[in-house]
Amino acid sequence: MSKDSQMRAAINQKLIEMGERERLKELLRAKLVECGWKDQLKAHCKDVIREKGLDHVTVEDLVNEITPKGRALVPDSVKKELLQRIRAFLAQHAAL
Amino acid sequence: MKMEDMALSGPDNTRLEALVHDIYSELVEDACLGLCFEVHRAVKHGYFFLDDTDPESAKEFEIVDQPGLDIFGQVYNQWKNKECECPNCKRLIAASRFAPHLEKCLGMGRNSSRIASRRLASNNNNVSKSESDQEDNDDLNDNDWSYGAEKKCEQSENQREIPNNSPRRSKSLKHKNDDKLPFVSLALFQYNNYNNAGISYETLGPEEVRSLLTTQCGVISEHTKKMCTRSQRCPQHTDEQRRSVRVFLLGPSASSLPDADATVEADMFELQGDGSGAQSLISRLQWEDSPEISPTDSASSRASTNHSDPRRPKKKKRTSLVLNSTAGGGGGGGVSGEGTSGSLTSGSNGGVSQSNVSLPAKKKRPKLPAPSISSIYDDLN
């Protein structure tokens, strides 16, 4: 177990070091805006905020409300592409 | 590091897959968190709901999706048959044909010189015709009325062009049919002009030069050494330039613009011819003068004054006539100097005639005086 977490940390560090994590993040953001994910979530945010009242909104509330929905709304194609990129990175890295 | 690589390439792919999914969900959560921050900031700054509209206006500006309508619910080809009024000739022209019509009507664009000289030619051709006839001619030549009319005109134009395939040539041929010698030579010049876009003045005889200068701008270009073939009020050259060219080619006695001279004469004749009757006529002319400037109008007036072409004898007579008129007609004296220097304030009747004379380019000359001028002139001859 400690070995597993150790490996995780190493890989994360590698992702950040190589700048791959930033690249993936940027790619994901672009794809999500492109496919309307962001607009959908914003509409959902509006409902949440109206429900709670404008002055009583906290970031925590929003995160709790939005994140599950956001995760569910990511289109399959985007998800597949991202997983593919991550796998490719790991494979490439393992080859070194 | 090496140990981890070994672990990654190891047999348990499930662990690797779990790792990939973890990374992925982290990324997605990052994106969600970013959005949450963004929305929260917008809410706290109060601009989150700015792009919202109330339901009524949302309904009002709903995008219409019906056949035959655009997204605003309007019939989208309603502009197809829209007509515009030409500010120059006051006719209604289909909007799609308005720009080309305006180009022709105002005589601008690259065809202007050709159209202007064509107009000039037709004016010379039927000197005695009235202005309304001129306008009718214009109608025939102008294809801007509608699509149907355009097609008709194109057909007829094609038929006309069959013999020698050039409207210009046919124009000049039309001139040749006239029996008046000066016009024939003039037409020949114009025909040359069409080919050269300018005349080299050295090749012309004095008579030719004179008849040319009575109808055209004639300013000699610095670059090409050719004469300008546009009308006498062509915007490229100033009156000053035209005058100096005439001084250069015809000598100092012809320093003023010929058309100005001619109109001066005309009015002097009027003044002298029948005393008070002429005065009343002049005041009527003032009324009939309209502010709108039309190229055909002024051209036709010039054509009418050019009707009797030998200029020299006319000029000599003019001076004496002017002297007479100064004796009889109040403030007419100023006219004898320069046609263009008359004052615009109309004090006496003589002054009135002066202002008429001094602006031949800007005032519309009614058709009435044209025949009377020539008849009087014939009497004098």
Image (cartoon, helix red, strand yellow):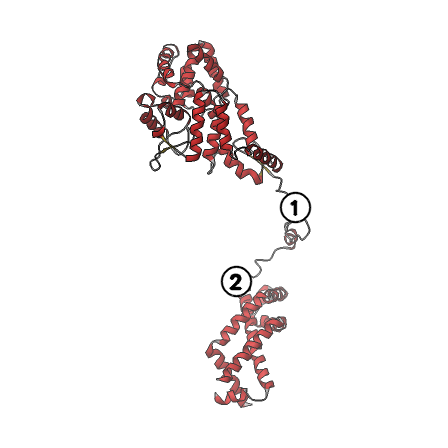
Query: In the image, is residue B211 above or below residue A19?
Result: above
Residue identified by numbered label 1: B75
Label located before the other in sequence (1 or 2): 2
Q: Name the foreground residue: B40 vs B239.
A: B239
Q: Amino acid at mark 1?
A: Val
Q: Secondary structure at mark 1?
A: loop
Q: Chain of mark 1?
A: B
Residue A61: x, y in percent?
59, 71
- Image quadrant assignment for residue A72: bottom right
Q: Chain of mark 2?
A: B
Residue B281: x, y in percent?
48, 14
Q: Is residue B286 visible?
A: yes
Q: Name the foreground residue: A59 vs A3.
A: A3
Structural crowding at the residue carrying mark 2, measured as other residues with C-alpha within 10 Å and reported as few (<14), some (14–19) or many (≥20): few
Q: Name the foreground residue: A96 vs B119.
A: B119
Structural crowding at the residue carrying mark 1, measured as other residues with C-alpha within 10 Å and reported as few (<14), some (14–19) or many (≥20): few
Residue B150: x, y in percent?
59, 36
Query: In the image, is residue A46 above or below residue B136?
Result: below
Question: Image quadrant for the C terminus of chain B?
Answer: top left
Q: Name the foreground residue: B304 vs B227.
A: B227
Residue extending furthest right? B67
Query: In the image, is residue B176 above or below residue B84?
Result: above
Nearer the camera: disc 1 or disc 2: 1
Residue identified by numbered label 2: B45
Residue B161: x, y in percent?
54, 34
Q: Secondary structure at mark 2?
A: helix
Task: Same chain for labels 1 and 2? Say yes or no.
Answer: yes
Q: Amino acid at mark 2?
A: His
Residue extending furthest front? B163
Q: CA distance from mark 1 to mark 2?
A: 42 Å
